[in-house]
Image (tube, rainbow, N blue to C red):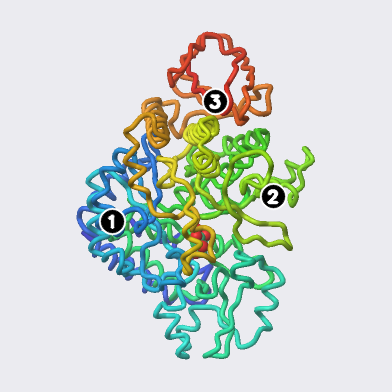
Amino acid sequence: MNEEFQTRLASRYDELRQLYCALYPGREDTLPQLLSAMEGMYRARSEDLKRSDRQRESDPGWYRSRERLGMMLYVKPFAGDLNGVRDRLDYLRECGVNYLHLMPLLESPRGRSDGGYAVSDFRRVQPELGTMDDLEALTGDCRRRGISVCLDFVMNHTSEDHEWARRARAGEREYQERYFFYDSWDIPNLYEQTVPQVFPTDAPGNFTWQEELGKVVMTTFYPYQWDLNYANPTVFREMTENLLFLTNRGIDVIRLDAVPYIWKQLGTNCRNLPQVHTLVRMLRIVTEIVCPGVLLLGEVVMEPALVAPYFGTPERPECHMLYNVTAMCTTWHTAATHDVRLLRHQLNQVAALPKGYTFQNYLRCHDDIGWGLDYPFLSQFGMGEVPHKRFLNDYFTGKLPYGASRGTLYNDDERLGDARLCGTTASLCGLETALETGSAAMTEQALSLDLMLHACMLSQSGIPVLYAGDEVGQRNDWAYLDDPEKAGDSRYLHRGDFRWDEAELRNEPDTVQGRLFRGLERLEAVRRSAPVFDADAEFWTVDAGNHAVLVLGRYKNGEKLYGLYNFSPEPQKAWLDETGAYTDLLGQRQADNPGVLTLGGYEFLWLTRRV
Ligand code: GLC
């Protein structure tokens, strides 16, 4: 059966070799080691997975169906451990989820784990969550139920407890060469002149002094996360093997964590360097040879112009999927300003991209919301970067005399006025405040906003991904402040235990949980049933003559859809240059003549007609 491997390799060998030689000049001698590692991993791959690889190879767009719906969750707060998740698969099925992103679950030291993003062993599951066998059993169960599983591959760094780091600390040169070590602060100080900071208040600086060694090590994220040196071919090979080890456990989607950071060069900002693209392209080729059913999801939290290049080109693709981070943060900006002009502008940019690009759309994830908005565009409306960020943060942390949002700041860097934001969707939509004050009107408003934002997300092109708990309106978990291991990282505000007691209420139509759950279920069912939501449908935005109302257009196979979203809490009018009869897909109203429509506060409509 090695023939299959050889055939796949043969058709990609020249390019792989060319990229490898360009990245590792003079180290071509190490390429055979990479190839034999790949072959070993191919041999170790189960027949079951190989069968699925072949099927997916013959249907390369297998993951792009409009029926695909994702959810991301942390194993422990959701179900205790991996076996607990297996027991909850019926719930995920009920949510319509067929793509499950399990947040980091590999071994990671307690208290120095960055939510699992500081991995000390890429081949062991955190003991409290279970074992590799449990993970394999879970991915097996998921596969049988048609659920694809995504796992993070934290490739920019290892934990300081990883074996390589321990051996480096013990003075082994070979292992020190897998990281960036310096004998003095001279070079690190030069780097600091051009490299921005990821956690400016929680973990300032990009380097950490190692007392035992009397050396400085590069730590772009937290001091306990040591940056790996991908200029060393051994690092690339061994990390690639780790990646393949995980795919052989049945992982379908590999999330390339913090991928823009993986190549460092003095005098640059150490982000998105050309070598990063070479590395991602090589990973794509490697997976196409060993496990072509596996997808790469790039975590590129950057401005739009820097995101799309991670798709590569049609001839030389890199990631299969990327996060639509700009649409996400611009959506929240729009919720605060009630002005859709920037969102329209961003969605038009997305619409202009090739239809083969697959974005993951989302409202919230495990991270903070960074306000990476298009400030040059906003400046035409008199919105400056620093004051606008301050406004957004004040608005969403409930500091203004109006609005019911409740979030908290993250890495509040007063120097730059650059704080980011944490909070769950429901709390940012005002549900927490509403339920606390017992105001029925506020509750209505929060639910309307929450559903409207989800509807807007669901009608964009790509794969919608829910953040577990959002389907039942889970609020912030302020208890993180009482836990010394979490209190210093406000992202734990939206990483609380899953409230199964509240989720139980999803079947009671008059509860908050029931209304959100059933509301989302409805939207998802409509999305699944109508080809106009396909990834390759035409997609555009419409000027509705009112800055508070976003109108999205979609077209496929003779069917046209208008999605209208009122981002204001007040009723608004929208003008559409249309006269024919439309059907309201959600069945709320007769829309015989959509020329002028009045939408209630935060109301949305999905109107279709045959054209
Ligand atoms: C990614 C993760 C984030 C983590 C960082 C460092 O950005 O999403 O949670 O802190 O990588 O690994």
Mark 1 close to ligand 1, CB under 8 Å: no
Nearer to us of marks 3 and 1 is 3
Query: In the rendered image, which quarter is residue 234 located in?
Result: bottom left
Lower sequence index among marks 1 and 2: 1
Residue 265, how many percent across, how many down? 62, 71
Which residue is under mark 1? 250
Q: Is residue 2 left or right of residue 272?
A: left
Mark 2 close to ligand 1, CB under 8 Å: no
Q: Is residue 590 visible?
A: yes
Lower sequence index among marks 3 and 1: 1
**Amino acid found under the numbered disc labelled 1:** Gly
Q: Is residue 259 visible?
A: no
Which residue is under mark 3? 603
Q: Residue at horizontal 74%, vertical 52%?
A: 386
Q: Residue at horizontal 43%, vertical 21%?
A: 586
Q: Residue at horizontal 52%, vertical 28%?
A: 538
Q: Residue at horizontal 48%, vertical 53%?
A: 494
Query: Which mark, residue 348?
Result: none
Residue 533 vertical placement versus 22 (above, below): above
